[in-house]
Image: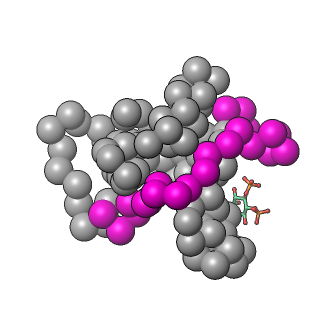
């Protein structure tokens, strides 16, 4: 599954709150391949290669959990992703259908 995702980092590994200055929303093109969610920066082109920075932003979704962010009301269509090492991300999808489709895909790998 692919598509635009806006990401906010809420907690780093071990669940430590991500410090101020690193909590802003950033737009990526998300590419879910196997157990890795790649987050590609910049303009989207189907043939574009992943950069070193893109690879650093990649998220392992093995033993992760995605769920609708029912308690987050500042933006619509936002879901949480909690990884096995207790990182927490918020991702905003372009619409409700996309949000649900990301949640389902992430939780059923
Ligand atoms: C963050 C940025 C986020 C905001 C976050 C800020 O600042 O303004 O948009 O989250 O608030 O810390 P920075 O880019 O300097 O890290 P919201 O959009 O959810 O308000 P937070 O610390 O209360 O999460």
Where's the C terminus, which quadrant? Answer: top left
Residue 56 located within the stretch drawn in magenta: yes
* Residue 30 sits inside the magenta stretch: no
Question: Vertically, is 109 above or below 77?
Answer: below
Task: State the colouring used for the structure image.
Answer: one colour
Q: Residue furthest top?
A: 97
Location of residue 9 (image quadrant) = bottom right
Main SS class of the magenta portion in the image = loop
In the displayed structure, does residue 54 sit left or right of residue 91? left
Q: With 60 as the anchor, is 103 left or right in this view?
A: right
Ligand 1 in which quarter: bottom right
Tell me what residue is drawn at x 37 percent, y 52 percent: 35
- Asked whether residue 11 appears in the rendered view, the answer is yes
**Residue drawn 81% across the image and 39% down it:** 70
Q: How many marks?
A: 0
Work out whether residue 42 can be spotted: no
Magenta stretch, residue numbers: 55-77
Quadrant (top left/top right/bottom left/bottom right) for the N terminus: top left
What percent of the width, then of the height, locates residue 44? 29, 38
Q: Percent position (x, y) of residue 103?
A: 57, 37
Q: Residue at x 32, y 47 (%)?
A: 34
In-image side of 30 versus 98 (left or right): left
Q: Is residue 76 above or below residue 37?
A: above
Residue 94 on image: x %, y %: 55, 29
């Amino acid at each position: 599954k692919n598509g635009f995702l806006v990401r906010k980092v809420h907690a780093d590994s071990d669940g430590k709150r991500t410090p101020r200055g690193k909590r802003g929303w950033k737009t990526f093109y998300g590419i879910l391949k196997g157990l890795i969610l790649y987050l590609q920066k910049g303009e989207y082109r189907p043939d574009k290669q992943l950069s070193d920075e893109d690879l650093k932003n990649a998220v392992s979704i093995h033993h992760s959990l995605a769920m609708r962010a029912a308690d987050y009301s500042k933006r619509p269509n936002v879901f949480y992703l909690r990884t096995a090492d207790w990182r927490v991300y918020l991702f905003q999808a372009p619409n409700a259908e996309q949000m649900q489709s990301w949640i389902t895909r992430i939780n059923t790998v």
